[in-house]
Image: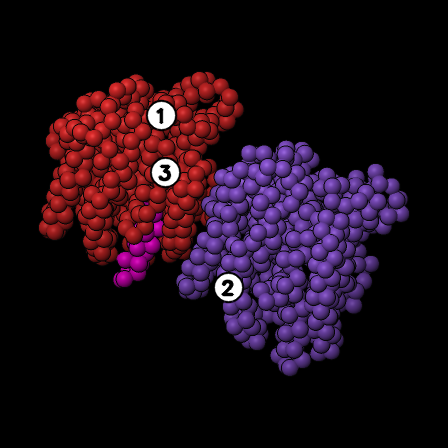
Chain colours: A purple, B red
Amino acid sequence: MATETTHHVAMTLSDHLPVLAILVPFVAAPLCVLLGSRSLTWPITFLASAASFVTSFLLLLSVIDGGFISYHIGGWAPPLGIEYRVDAANAFVLFLVTGISTIVLPYARESVKSEIPERHHTLFYACFLLCLTGLLGVAVTGDAFNVFVFLEISSLSTYVLIAQGSYRDRRALTAAYDYLIMGTIGATFFVIGLGMLYMATGTLNMADLADRIADQGANRTVRAAFAFIVVGIGLKVAIYPLHLWLPNAYTYAPSAVTAFLAATATKVAVYVLMRFLFSVFQPSFLFEVNTLEFMIIPFAILAMFAASFIAIFQTDLKRLLAYSSIAQIGYMLLGIGLLNESGVAAAVAHLFNHGITKAVLFMGVGALVLRSGGSFFDRIEGMGKLMPWTSAAIVIGGLSLIGVPGTAGFLSKWLLVQGALEKGWWPIAILVVLSSLLAVIYVWRIVEAMYLRSPASDIEAKEAPLSMLVPIWIMAIACIYFGFATDITLTASHTAAQGLLAGPVGLH
Amino acid sequence: METNTAILLTMLIPALATVTNIVFRKQPNLRDGITLAAAVATFLTVLTILSNVGNGTTEPLVLFEILPGIDIAFNVEPLGLLFAIVASGLWILTHIYGIGYMRGNNESHHARFFACFSFAISSVMGIAFASNMFTLFLFYELLTLSTYPLVAHKGTEEAIRGARTYLGILIGTSIGLQLVAVIWTYAITGTLDFTKGGILEGHISGPMVAILLALYAFGIGKAALMPFHRWLPAAMVAPTPVSALLHAVAVVKAGVFTMLKVGIYIFGIDFLAETGASEWLMWLAAFSIIAASVVAMTKDNLKARLAYSTVSQLSYITLGMALATSMGALGGGMHIAMHAMGKITLFMCAGSIYVATHKTNISQMTGLGRIMPITFGAFLIGALSIIGLPPLGGSWSKWLLIVGAADTGQWVMIGVLMASSLLNVAYLLPLVGRGFFLSDPDAEPIEGMAESPLLVWLPPAITAIGCIVLFFFAGDLQDFLSPIVVPN
């Protein structure tokens, strides 16, 4: 694979793209607070997110065919200085995260107005920007400790964002508190793991860590570090038995926050997991292969079935989708566990495809909540007639969630089944398609409720405002577009998978 | 017109009709008129493709590449063209019938109904012209999804339950089994293109061939092979035009069409014959033929009886493929057209009786034949064609299937086909006899009852004549289809 490196001293603006993607929202957040103007907050937030999106897109273009960009913060050379390292895997994640935030923000404007008192808007958007910064930072950095720092930035701001749902439903406070506890335990585990790695190797730069772990081989400290890190990130990913924080957090957070987090936060965590599994530790590390085969894959399959099964019986649409997310994370973990190119590519592709799918669904539900006053099934009955555009978009999202051909969700499932077959694990391939059938059941509960029941008598809903419909439909069209125009997803996910599976690429 | 442009148009025109149905939902005459024009235009476009066939083959029409080696692509081959002609030609008649039926019956949501109907036709065209298994699968799923609202149309508890069964079985089998088969095929051959002589030979052997065939055969739920046939009777809650075109022609024929495509172009008839992988399928199809006929006899509801009759007749086509001889495959292909013409006649007659008298059960239809002679006359002709008596179209396809069975020395299969004809007589003809010759002493006076409206009785009369016409053109049809079994 061709590798390219950039100069230690960056000369032009385009050389600074990796840091700009993070820096713009990071600077915009305090700017919002300092200006303190309610009318300026939203435009600043949106512009920062859009600028970050453009930056990420440029980054993706420059690495989509392989290679990576290494950027040294402040010109300090790694491993001592902090390195940002962009390759196909994380450029794709940056593209997803900034894309979702840029599309969710116009939607958020109306939704946030109805769910959060106006005096909190400035702080809300500042938190949103910090959360964005954190997620992007986690993805872009090549320094293990830096991952922890950004993870905390995103987590702390996420707790605040979720708690904002308390103006609609007080349970948002306990949901945020639960997540705070669980998230903190996760972060602690993660940092303990990092400490052990530092003890064993004396470095925190990921590429350097990888080289040194490979040199010294596995010992007890490294194994313990591995376990701590996997569990720590696993909490953030919501790997099946560590998922307890997720349903409440997604259900009670403000609609726009749910749409943003569901599409990005767990996806970034999945990326970090892959980075550590494949780049820092290597698949040749036997302990890791065992962990994947005997822990991650069984839990992934459990998630695919158990969480889908729980989703079928939910009475709250948001909670149903939250459980569905846990099940879908199972697919990504399964792809990772397959340890072959198709499998890992499936994980990367699903990370993206599921991101846009869940964005449509949660935004659509948010629009229903705005008009009908709740996300319980009895509130959404008959909405197909009252809010035809929103409902149609939800159906498209639902089809993509099932993985009907011609939608984005289909592609990742195809890759996943192919990966399982390549490995000769055909029972797993069959389990993947069988679990999709559970998705048919819960998606069809939504369809039946929206189209075949009559609305509750007290609901006089009209179609959602245009500022919400347009973002919803951009995402719905993306669900179909990426079902046909697969070259971006496929190229990026295959390049990413090759890059990840190639193991560490040392310092240059 | 270029063939490739025409292929696109056959899908775009019905899709546009979907849009016009939604846009003009408040103006029924304009809306139905445009849809009728679209139906005629689609049929003419398909005929254009037919007239182009002699001008040498063209490159397939490739729209997108989905995965390396897998495109959304279309081309013309005899089986697909036949399917397209049948479906688009009968769409015109069914649409006329549908207007009469929906208005005569005061059904609700006309615009939604015709919009979904047009979209289903668009998907059928995609299936007919698909040049690889992936494209076919895509449109196969679209067809399921677009017909779901039609089955649930009435919105009653019964309709919702029926629609749930419909979707559950069709999506369940297609994603749970067919998709696995498709990905498996792709994983071992690296292609999914429909190729003469099949693509699997040399890539798979032993019992795995039979397993892969089983994944396809059961995965193609639309072919209603037992035990995955229950969706078809469940779909009968839909308004009759839906049962007529979709559940006697378009949807079920899409199923057996896919079955034939898989047998001929994925496995290859010779490969199936060599490995004997399809033998079990032949026996299962034979069982399906007999068992469904027996169940049909027990049904008093006319549409349910016809539905089980369809289950039985579809297995003729599966049997034709599973015989793994060229005559069997030809007979199966021809039966697509013959059965379509006969069964749509029967369904439209059932609907016509319902519109005129609101009767659904055979036991209530005593003496109706004298009031509705055209409807019952058409029913008789359709029934005779299904049974397979000359001078009606159905006799030829059955003939070819029997020749195919004789070719391979499957004498039992000949017995099955014969027995099935007798069973057809037993469950189809009593209605005609009851209608014309019996009179019910307890029946209420039947004043005011008359033949159904013109728009409702005319289409079945035309298709009944079609059954007769097909008898005389069977030779041409066979010549037209024969390239599918001639090796390159």
The location of residue B330, given as percent across then percent down, is 20, 40
Q: Mark 2 highlights which residue?
A: A301
Numbered circle sitting on residue B101: 1
**Most foreground residue, A383 or A298:** A383
* Circles 1 and 2 in contact, beta carbons < 8 Å: no
- Above-or-below relation of B105 to A188: above
Q: Which label is found at residue B237?
A: 3
Type of residue at label 2? Ile
The C terminus of chain A sits in image quarter: bottom right
Chain letter of the residue carrying label 1: B
Please tell me whether mark 3 sits on a helix, a strand or a loop: helix
Neighbor class of circle 1 (other Cα within 10 Å; few <14, some 14-19, many 20+) is many
Give the percent coordinates (x, y) of residue B275.
22, 57
Quarter of the figure with residue B476: top left
- Residue nearest the viewer, comparing B4 with B399: B399
Task: Give the vertical position of B61 relative to A149 (above or below).
Answer: above
Residue at the image point whose x is 79% and y is 41% from the top:
A42
**Amino acid type of the residue that numbered disc 1 sits on in the rendered structure:** Tyr
Q: CA distance from mark 1 to mark 2?
A: 50 Å
The chain holding disc 3 is B
Magenta-highlighted residues? B204-222
**Left or right position of B85 against A369:** left
Q: Do marks 3 and 2 both belong to one polypeptide chain?
A: no
